[in-house]
Image (tube, grey):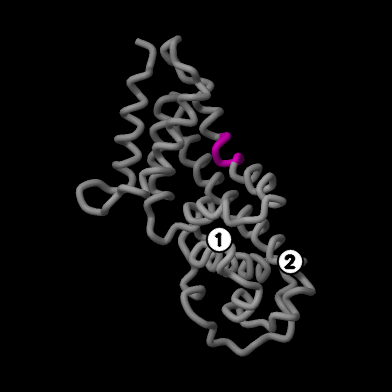
Amino acid sequence: MLSIGRQKRAKGKSSRKKRSTPPRSSARRLELLSVAAALFAKKGYTGTSIRDVAEVYGVLSGSLYHHVDSKEALYIESHGLVINEAAQRLREVTQKYTEPWDKLRAACEVTAEFQLDPTSLKYPMLNHLMQTPKSMRKTLVAQRNKFENIFSEIIETLQLDPTVERSIFRLSLITALNGSSVWYRRGRLTPKQVGTRVFEIFHHCKRC
């Protein structure tokens, strides 16, 4: 399974001998997608080429097109891989709790860790959305919603003050978590603690 952290091999050129064709097995395709995701996260959509992916992975760039239709298709598939793993991790953590507010606290903590981990793939790939062609964005947003829908499910079960609009509550919470990467500096608080502090602010909306 792809690690949310960047793959080390994407930081430099592959030292392996070039393969004539890219991998056919599911395990090797997953490895290829992992390399592509790490490069897209590091260099952005516009800054990454099929040649870059082929060079780091160790295949000839021309042969990559026999298994990848385009850079757009490769980005969509690798983006989906990263988001699916993040969503799976979020579900695993939140399902340990039965009380909705405990679920939300855990979700905030995990999301902050994704956002503030310097090796995270999820945050930069989400941030590169506006670099991608408009024709791709509907698919990318649908993939991203798999993660954000977990928040929606939890928030629907919360006992909130009647004056609180749930959709605004959800969007404000996700914005606060995503925006933490702009101001966060390592030191006083860990990423998990940042998630806890953000949760505590929204916890005040709890119905008394």
Contact, mark 1 vs mark 2 (Cβ under 8 Å): no
x and y, in percent, of residue 92 in the image: 51, 42
Q: Quadrant of the N terminus?
A: bottom right
Q: Which residues are magenta?
A: 145-149
Q: Residue at x 46, y 36 (%)?
A: 174
Q: Quadrant of residue 175?
A: top left
Q: Residue at x 40, y 29 (%)?
A: 102
Q: Is residue 150 left or right of residue 109?
A: right
x and y, in percent, of residue 74 in the image: 68, 63
Mark 1, mark 2: which one is toward the viewer? Answer: 2
Q: Residue furthest left?
A: 188
Q: Residues within 10 Å of mark 1 (few under 14, many from 20)?
A: some
Cα–Cα span, label 1 and label 2: 21 Å
Tell me, yes or no, whether the highlighted magenta stretch contains residue 185: no
Q: Quadrant of the C terminus?
A: top left
Looking at the rendered structure, the secondary structure element under dot 1 is loop
Type of the residue with mark 2:
Ser
x and y, in percent, of residue 132 in the image: 62, 56
Q: Residue furthest bottom?
A: 17
Closer to us: 6 or 96: 6
Where 90 falls versus 64 (above or below)?
A: above
Mark sitting on residue 2: 1
Closer to us: 139 or 132: 132
x and y, in percent, of residue 114 in the image: 43, 50
Residue named by callout 2: 70
Where 176 falls versus 46 (above or below)?
A: above
Q: Earlier in the sequence, mark 1 or mark 2?
A: 1
Type of the residue with mark 1:
Leu
Looking at the rendered structure, the secondary structure element under dot 2 is loop
